[in-house]
Image (tube, rainbow, N blue to C red):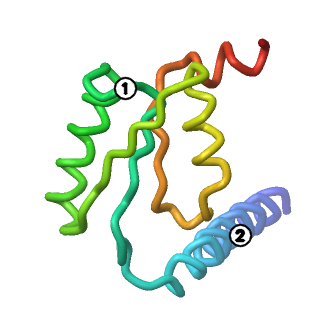
Amino acid sequence: MPMLVSKFANAAKSAATVLSLVALALPAAAQGAYPTQAVRFVVGNVAGSSSDTVARVFSGALTNALGQQALIINQPGAGGTIAADAVARAAPDGYTIKVTSTQAHAISPHL
């Protein structure tokens, strides 16, 4: 009898896992192609900084991979807080990506 209960429990876990994965995939299947517009990389440092260089490398790779233009927008000032605020106020559509050092997230909130 314990063996039968164990098999049933394993089957129930497997079914629950499959149903969970299907449920998570449904919203993604309902979405259209991505990207349909330019992707924006918002950098909280000046042009030529290490964060800007990383953003330019990634934007070039993203442009080649997706066939859609990627823009670099430098918004220096206030230790990256200005750029962080701009990204926080952007539409939550996946087209705005923040590139920063740890300062804007680790230090600035404690000032």
Q: Which mark is residue 16?
A: 2
Q: Residues within 10 Å of mark 2 (few under 14, many from 20)?
A: few
Q: Which mark is residue 46?
A: 1
Residue 43 horizontal/vertical position (percent) = 43, 35
Residue 40 horizontal/vertical position (percent) = 40, 54
Q: Residues within 10 Å of mark 1 (few under 14, many from 20)?
A: some
Asked if 47 appears above or below 60 in the picture, the reply is above
The amino acid on which the numbered mark 1 sits, given as a three-letter code, is Val
Residue found at the very far front of the displayed protein: 77
Residue 22: quadrant of the picture? bottom right
Q: What is the secondary structure assignment of the residue under circle 1?
A: loop
Asked if 35 appears above or below 43 in the picture, the reply is below
CA distance for labels 2 and 1: 50 Å
Nearer the camera: disc 2 or disc 1: 1
Residue 1: quadrant of the picture? bottom right
Q: Residue at x 28, y 56 (%)?
A: 70
Residue 111 horizontal/vertical position (percent) = 78, 12
Q: Residue at x 60, y 79 (%)?
A: 27
On screen, residue 111 versus residue 79, left or right, reads right
